[in-house]
């Protein structure tokens, strides 16, 4: 029997390793649990199956059967029992088995840290163990943030193709010169610990350049034309097109996804650069109209995900003191302390608080609805131009007119001094081109003008990208756009004729009057509805034309009913709304330039019990997006949305509606184009019907003709009397104050259309419709239910063939 040899303290040489005496039971525990507590420490992984008995294994006598049968020849070595056993268990021996060491000798050895890969040549047992919290530096592998060889990868920068880096040329400078040089770009604060301690890091060779790849979550939703747009934006803003210019103009038409393209550019610059692991920019500012601040924040969440970015949207909730403090904190932050890299702010707020930015370095500036910057003398232009930012992108869906001063203002903002100063531009380009265009100019002037124009366009077109709405036809439902010519109601007609024959207008046409704008504005309001005017004061002597049921505005008291039959356009609108409510589940947007007209729409809808929402300049900025979301909700009860073209015409997505009425035209065609593009946009699922109401034979037709022919007024808003007198000759003014009662469409008469007969009926269908040219659209006259208008695609216009309110219709079909 194997017994433990007892040792006394006196004759024991190693006192530390004497096993303790048998412990008593602790608090009712079993003897086994007590034994487990006093057992010596065993390294993990050393547990091996132990024998059940403590007795030593029984020794067997070795037996050799060698040469028992005489089969072993001389020189042959006989098999031993160990060899036979190894041969029998050769499969089991393929894998090494941990062999138990003698416990007495093992526990007497010094403790060492158990390592996985313990090598005698590389491991020194006397070396102190590593301190807690320290780890070896990771080996930096230069690679792109996203895989450039992925299935749907879109590469914006390929170092093998686009890298234009030139080896730096070291200029010889004296020591005195070197000391005088002060780095302007390097901040004086926020030095790293290494710089403070004077430790210079050794940079072994240059980091290799890596590809810049669009984030896959964005790449999978970008359409081909948007990929092309993002590549253009990236090449411009990183100086790949021209190293001296890092700005550009994104002039795609409305609905082509300029917002998504700019978000892709911004996200790429914030996260990647050709230098692996470094971003191109740290901060970005998005300047936009106040209505779109919340919309931009929503778009960032929509395309990048909820937690990808934390934007700083200034939506009017903070007080002036809080906002000043927040902007200062945002400006001071740099490096890892930048928690909100994107600032979304309205033009008005940015203009007021521009001094709070204090020259902080801003990586990228996006100017949404950038046609506000066409005037280089405006306060907004001056404020934005004072920001310390090189990469500037102007977004404008409205067509850029061939106006040289606009060209200069926009390009000078995007790329300051690229075309020189305003005087240089005027001397080198503007004056020669204008002389060449002058009808009285010589051939030499014309040649020089053409040469200067060609040179200018070569410089300018490198930084402007423009695509038309035709691209959208592949992705969106069909859009039917109509110009609806409405006859004036009898009451309107009498008042109109009375006004244009009044002494005031006659003196105005003789050049003695000084208020043409007031007269034009009164005529435009009269075309909408007589109730927009105070007839007794505005049109003295008009009382003789009042119908029997007419009650002046002041004498109506609580009567809120709208007399739609006083206005031709209002009668048509009333019938349209009733038909939509009765036969369809469509929603409609009503747009006007006048809030008084919106008030009238509001009364009409409430009198008819239609659900209505309204957005105009009086609404707080932070409530506007909530209103839009409510209307776009398919389950919403409101089917009419009233919109002021000035307050909400730019950038809003009203895809909940598929019908839109522009009730009155604007002098500026850009304003009308912005308003008309609210419903036919990305996300629209239903066919769209757009209507532009024009009063037949009136001043509205003259305004529409100037838009169509892109004459002098088409690129500016008339906002001062001297402008009107400058832009209108006396003949033009006389045309404005004429009324043509015996025509179905004065505009159609000016076309001299070859596809229509003398009575206005179209006998050759339009072959190729050009959106900007109404001469190429389908032309219909109201000749009853059996005529062409009775077979038009839109049920709302088909019902007008039974009435005489609509005189003619122009129709454009997108695809």
Image (cartoon, helix red, strand yellow):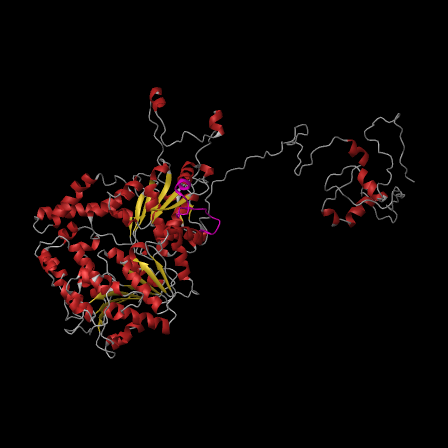
The residue located at (35%, 70%) in the rendering is 608
Find residue 536 and report its horizontal and vertical position in percent: 19, 62
Classify residue 513 as left or right of residue 408: left
**Residue at image x 35%, y 71%?**
580
* Range of residues picked out in magenta: 304-323
- Indicate whether residue 276 is drawn in magenta: no
Residue 737: % across, % down? 13, 61
Quadrant location of the C terminus? bottom left
| Of 513 and 560, the residue lying toward us | 560
Q: Quadrant of residue 626?
A: bottom left
**Residue 202 placement (x, y as % from top left):** 47, 29
The residue depicted at 23 percent of the width and 44 percent of the height is 408
Residue 772 horizontal side relative to residue 448, left or right = right
Q: Nearer the viewer, residue 630 or 83?
A: 630
Residue 36 in view, yes or no:
yes
Residue 468 appears anywhere in the view: no
Residue 376 sits in quarter: top left
| 509 vs 578: above or below | above
Task: Name the quadrant of the N terminus.
Answer: top right
Q: Nearer the viewer, residue 479 or 608?
A: 608
The spot of residue 111 in percent (x, y) is 73, 32
Q: Is residue 322 magenta?
A: yes
């Amino acid at each position: 029997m194997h017994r433990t040899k007892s040792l006394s303290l006196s004759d024991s040489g190693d006192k530390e390793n004497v096993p303790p005496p048998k412990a008593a039971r602790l608090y009712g525990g079993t003897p086994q649990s007590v034994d487990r507590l006093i057992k010596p420490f065993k390294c993990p992984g050393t547990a091996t199956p132990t024998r059940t008995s403590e007795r030593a294994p029984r020794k067997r006598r070795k037996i050799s059967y060698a040469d028992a049968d005489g089969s072993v020849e001389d020189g042959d070595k006989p098999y031993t029992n160990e060899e036979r056993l190894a041969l029998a268990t050769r499969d089991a021996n393929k894998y090494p088995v941990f062999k138990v060491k003698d416990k007495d000798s093992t526990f007497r050895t010094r403790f060492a840290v158990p390592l996985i890969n313990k090598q005698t040549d590389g491991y020194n047992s006397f070396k102190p163990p590593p301190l807690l919290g320290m780890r070896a530096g990771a080996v930096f592998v230069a690679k792109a943030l996203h895989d450039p060889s992925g299935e749907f990868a879109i590469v914006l920068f390929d170092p093998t193709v686009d890298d234009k880096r030139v080896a730096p040329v070291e200029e010889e400078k004296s020591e005195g010169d070197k000391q005088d040089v002060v780095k302007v770009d390097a901040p004086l604060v926020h030095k790293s610990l290494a710089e403070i301690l004077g430790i210079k890091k050794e940079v072994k060779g240059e980091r290799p350049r890596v590809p810049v790849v669009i984030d896959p979550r964005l790449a999978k939703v970008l359409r081909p034309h948007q990929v092309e747009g993002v590549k253009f934006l990236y090449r411009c803003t990183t100086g790949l097109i021209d190293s001296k210019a890092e700005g550009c103009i994104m002039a795609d038409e409305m609905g082509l996804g300029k917002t998504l393209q700019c978000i892709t550019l911004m996200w790429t610059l914030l996260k990647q650069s050709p230098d692996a692991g470094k971003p191109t920019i740290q901060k970005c500012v998005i300047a936009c109209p106040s209505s779109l601040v919340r919309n931009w924040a929503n778009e960032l969440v929509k395309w990048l995900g909820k937690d990808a970015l934390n934007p700083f949207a200034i939506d009017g909730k903070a007080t002036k003191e809080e906002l000043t403090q927040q902007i200062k904190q945002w400006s001071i932050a740099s490096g890892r302390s930048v928690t909100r890299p994107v600032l979304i702010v309205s033009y008005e707020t940015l203009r007021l608080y521009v001094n709070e930015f204090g020259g902080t370095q801003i990586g990228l500036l996006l100017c949404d609805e950038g046609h506000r910057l066409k005037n280089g003398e405006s306060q907004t232009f001056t404020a934005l131009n004072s920001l310390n930012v090189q990469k500037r992108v102007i977004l404008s869906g409205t067509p850029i007119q061939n106006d040289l001063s606009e060209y200069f203002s926009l390009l000078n903002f995007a790329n300051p001094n690229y075309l020189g100063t305003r005087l240089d531009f005027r001397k080198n380009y503007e004056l020669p081109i204008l002389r060449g265009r002058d009808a009285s100019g010589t051939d030499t002037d014309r040649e020089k003008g053409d040469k200067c124009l060609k040179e200018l366009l070569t410089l300018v077109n490198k930084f402007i990208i423009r695509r038309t709405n035709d691209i959208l036809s592949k992705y969106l439902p069909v859009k039917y756009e109509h110009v609806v010519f409405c006859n004036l109601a009898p009451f309107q007609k009498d008042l109109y004729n009375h006004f244009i024959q009044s002494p005031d207008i006659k003196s105005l046409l003789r050049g003695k009057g000084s208020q043409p704008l007031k007269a034009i504005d009164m005529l435009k309001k009269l075309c909408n509805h007589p109730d927009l005017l105070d007839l007794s004061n505005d049109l003295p002597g008009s009382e003789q034309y009042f119908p029997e049921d007419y009650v002046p505005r002041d004498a109506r008291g609580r009567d809120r009913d709208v007399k739609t039959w006083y206005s031709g356009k209002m009668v048509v609108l009333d019938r349209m709304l009733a038909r939509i409510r009765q036969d369809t589940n469509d929603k409609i947007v009503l747009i006007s330039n006048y809030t008084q007209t919106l008030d009238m729409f509001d009364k009409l809808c409430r009198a008819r019990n239609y659900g209505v929402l309204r957005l105009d300049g009086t609404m707080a900025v932070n409530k506007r997006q909530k209103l839009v979301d409510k209307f776009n909700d398919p389950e919403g009860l409101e089917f009419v949305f009233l919109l002021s073209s000035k307050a909400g015409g730019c950038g809003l997505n009203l895809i909940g509606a598929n019908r839109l009425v522009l009730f009155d035209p604007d002098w500026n065609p850009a304003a009308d184009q912005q308003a008309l593009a609210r419903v036919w946009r990305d996300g629209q699922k239903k066919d769209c019907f757009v209507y532009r109401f024009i009063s037949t034979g009136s001043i509205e037709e003259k305004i529409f003709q100037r838009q169509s022919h892109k004459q002098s007024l088409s690129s500016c808003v008339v906002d001062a009397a001297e402008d009107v007198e400058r832009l209108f000759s006396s003949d033009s003014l006389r045309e404005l104050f004429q009324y043509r009662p015996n025509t179905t469409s004065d505009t159609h008469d000016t076309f001299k259309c070859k596809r229509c007969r003398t009575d206005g009926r179209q006998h050759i269908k339009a072959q190729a419709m050009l959106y900007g040219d109404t001469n190429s659209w389908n032309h219909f006259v109201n000749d009853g239910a059996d005529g062409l208008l009775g077979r038009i695609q839109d049920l709302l216009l088909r019902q007008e063939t039974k009435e005489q309110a609509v005189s003619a219709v122009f129709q454009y079909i997108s695809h």
